[in-house]
Amino acid sequence: MARTFLIDTDTASDDAVAIIMALRASDVRVAAITTVAGNVNVQQSTRNALYTVELCGADVPVYAGAEKPLLRRYENATWFHGRDGLGDHGYAPARRTPESMHAVDAIIQTIETNPGLVMVTLGPLTNVALALARKPQIASQVGRCVVMGGAPCCEGNVTPAAEFNIWVDPEAARLVMLSGLPIELVGWHLCRRDAVLHDDDIGRVLALNNRVASFAIECNSHARSAYKIQTGEDGICLPDPVTMCLALDPSVGNWSEHYVDVETQSELTRGMTVVDRLSVADDERNKTVWTEVLRRPRAKVYWTMDTQRWKAALMAGLR
């Protein structure tokens, strides 16, 4: 039987590739795609999701969601992905339109009608937090919640302490982490160095010689330039497709279970994903601060992955 996926996304260049991987997986049925403000505003995110679905010839409903974070001013990442989120190549608008239902309602409805589904989040967690605030019981109906977000025990990509998705809406991220959802955290560190698509990898993708593969490389051209400025590494970094790879096959990665909290008070470390890697959260000196977290299940945190299997999974999705 096909597994059911629900994808929440701030659709830009790497999100689009992740969506393609899910739509083209033979054992997956994508029940819904919900969009949120993040890399680009929610209207552009929705347009990009519709374009990607149409490119794949799929019939999946797309629902527009939150236009801004719960409490913060909205900050985008167009400097990284381009003004339209897809590298500014002037792709034609999709012919299809979004559904009339709000993404938050769609998340609740999709989970309730598909208990045990896999939820994959590729952007800020605003929609998911709002859905949980309205109906907390949906947390127990999700089989896995695979989150692209965080920089556990390493540097961030938007501040020294934080990864973009969590930093944009840290209050939403903290609510989700403490919701009881079966969280699997895929941090930015997994997507760097050997996981980056280098020239030989890009050549193999382009050699597939199909529209989807060409789009996957082309729409990430702006992101490639921005990533080199950001890190000094040359290549295409694909955090959302890495996350989708692990959602499709968690055995590609290595993980362990830990309590995780999100910093919301400090401007210096806003959005930091604080991982109790040495299991000291319940020590007497820490219990007061970690009380709320200790009431919840531990999250699975991915630390490493088999980069050859990741790239093979990407090729399979684009072939």
Image (cartoon, helix red, strand yellow):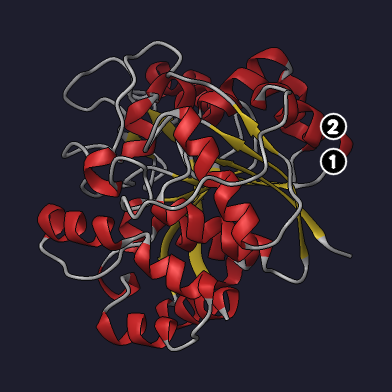
**Residue indicated by mark 2:** 112
Mark 2 is on which residue type?
A: Glu
**Badge 2 density bin: few <14, some 14–19, many ≥20, Cα 10 Å:** some
Callout 1 secondary element: loop
The residue that appears at 24% across and 50% down in the rendered structure is 154
**Residue indicated by mark 1:** 115
Residue 319 place in picture, x, y as percent: 58, 81
Residue 299 appears left or right of 100: left
Dot label at residue 89: none
The residue that appears at 53% across and 79% down in the rendered structure is 210
Number of numbered markers: 2
**Badge 1 density bin: few <14, some 14–19, many ≥20, Cα 10 Å:** some
The residue that appears at 50% across and 55% down in the rendered structure is 16
Q: Quadrant of residue 275?
A: top left
**250 to 105, vertically: above or below:** below
Q: Give the spatial CA distance, label 2 vs label 1.
A: 6 Å
Residue 47 place in picture, x, y as percent: 53, 39
Callout 2 secondary element: helix
The N terminus is located in which quarter? bottom right
Residue 79 appears left or right of 163: left
